[in-house]
Image (spheres, rainbow, N blue to C red):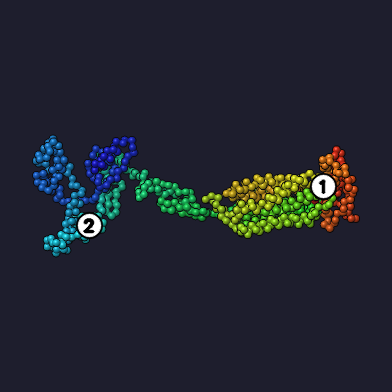
Amino acid sequence: MGTAWGLLLAASRSKDSAPFHWLASDGWGRQPHVVRDVEEVAEGALTVELHTEPIPGFDAYMAALTPENNLRNPWFEEYWQETFNCSLAKADPSNHSDHCAPGLRLGPDVGYLQESKVPFVVDAVYAFAHALHALQRDTCQGNGTCSSMLNMDGGNFYHNYLLKVNFTDLAGTQVKFNRMGDGLARYDISNYQRAENSSGYVYKTVGWWSETLVLEVDALAWTNGSRSVPTSTCSEPCGVGMIKRHHKKGDVCCWICDTCEEYEFVYNESTCADCGKGFWPYPDKRSCYELDVQYIPFFSPVAYGPIIISASGIAFTLATVGVFVRYNDTPLVRATGRELSYALLMGITLCFANTFVLLQKPSLTTCTMQRFSVGMGFCITYSALLTKTNRISRIFDSASKSARRPKFISPKSQVLITVALILVQTLGTFAWLVVEPPGTRFDYPDRRQVWLKCRIHDESFLLSQLYNILLICTCTVYAFKTRKIPENFNESKFIVFTMYTTCVIWLAFLPIYFTTRHAQEVQALTLCVSISLSAWVSLGCLFAPKVYIILFHPEKNVRRLTMSTTYRRRSGGRPSSSGMPTATTAIADHNDHNSKAGALVGRPGSGHYQACTPVGQQVDLVVSQSPGPTGSTSTNVAEGHEAAALL
């Protein structure tokens, strides 16, 4: 009791603190001295007290009891002096200033109130008496005490007799115990509040407990007389998607609320659980749903750009094919090397068509097509270009060293070389299909996205393009070597520009592709656009000039303009051992696969060679060399209808 009063006193001194709301056990109960001088602080307290009914006759017994007739209670005299604030003659007179008057009696006028615990004391005595009576009846047949009763084991007596007591006490209340030894739980709930029409305070009964709770909430008064029910800051209910984290193990009253991760749901009030990849929690965070699988729809707005670029490229490529077929036998078309030109156009068309394959919904079929289409489009294009640039380089390198015709420069040979280069990529793709079978997989760029992708790892894709990268690099080297050969219908400068631009495109593409592996749309669209741009560069640089001449300047598409080209080269001013420059001679093939070039005839050291061919056949290209001024040599090139194919 002193502790409760001291706590209330300390609370009254903290004027600046928030008001306290008190919940007290039956140790506080309805006792007035607990709240003495701290009534305002205690206002609104809820206390519980064991429910009891006053014992009839006990108040009359106490009113008649005096120190003179008290024969049993050794503490009664001390209680008497404390109650009346006086001193008994036989007590220590120094503690009180006045002696107790003879006519003093206990009653309500002096603050006497029957203690709430009195009925329990009386019930305890009667319970023990009933248990002993039952024991005597069972062991001594009701005839006084006997040895069996005196020797009864205490535990046996407790379980078999005391716990089985069941009677009605003096106040009319049933008394019995459960198997744990507890009596019937009956509590009164009191609220300490200001009395109506008074400045004083009283304990007002506002509810009770007897197997169920009954509480008159409207009758409650809280701190400062407030009728609003206060909330507990110790245990605020957690919000949506939050769980309880208890301060101490076993503490179920106070907790802090912790928020689950955005991809977690509330498994129970103290546990968050991961929904797992491909799932996301509902807004109420109670369970999860399966996320929609994403892919780039063919007709989505982001796909319109690549589709337009590819579709227009295919249209222009097919138009170019139509022009070449229409003017197939003209000098310019023949001079371009028709077989390799058509191979180039086929590879360019396949590059443009890659966009339509890459934008299809991933499946076993489309993923297999992607493995072939991306690599084969580039392989056909750059195999044909490599064959053409290699042929030009070999012809002019051979002409500077020997008068013999280089091997494998006929159209048939060129086609076979191109097919062989393409076959390497084809075999590599088949091996890739075996090592890493095609199919689909789910990719999770973040926890809220599920993308359907082909089962192709970025590293595998790069490895599959190494052969094409080798073709591009080799073709660029040959294009650079042949950039200064004769000018008429000279493709080398267009080829070298094509290769330079292609290298720039792919040097820019590769970092973007591998740094956006988690941005599926960006990665796929970047690949489509890069492939289409490479195809547009090849189509524009290699075929646009020829189509322009064929359609808009047909006067230039004649044999006359292919017969006089002068190629000058520096010899360093050093004559041969015979005192004359060394001749460089090259002979191109006929467009007719069955024609054969004649031999070169001339005097060694004369600086001039002439090609002799069988009667009725046209010499395609004769390179003759004669001394020029200031140590230079002038090489006259007479080109036939296939001459530009060398270039």
Residue density around tag 2, few if under 14, some if 14–19, many if 20 or more, within 10 Å: some
Instruction: Give percent across and percent down for residue 265.
Output: 46, 52
Residue 176's disc number: 2
Confirm whether residue 322 shows in the render: no
Quadrant location of the N terminus?
A: top left
Q: Which residue is mark 1?
A: 400
> What residue lies at 29% left-to-right and 48% top-to-bottom?
216
Residue density around tag 1, few if under 14, some if 14–19, many if 20 or more, within 10 Å: few
With 228 as the anchor, is 88 left or right in this view?
Answer: left
Amino acid type of the residue tagged 1 in the rendering: Ser
> Element type at marker 1?
loop
Instruction: Give percent across and percent down for residue 403.
Output: 84, 50
Instruction: Give percent across and percent down for residue 44.
Output: 29, 42
The residue furthest front is: 577
> What residue lies at 79% left-to-right and 57% top-to-bottom?
412
> What residue lies at 83% left-to-right and 44% top-to-bottom?
567
Calculate the distance from the C-alpha at mark 1 to the C-alpha at mark 2.
Answer: 127 Å
> What residue lies at 21% left-to-right and 56% top-to-bottom?
175
Confirm whether residue 507 shows in the render: yes
Q: Is residue 363 above or below residue 559?
A: below
Q: Nearer the viewer, residue 7 or 568?
A: 568
Reading the chain from its start, which is encountered first: label 1 or label 2?
2
Q: Nearer the viewer, residue 456 or 314?
A: 456
> Element type at marker 2?
strand
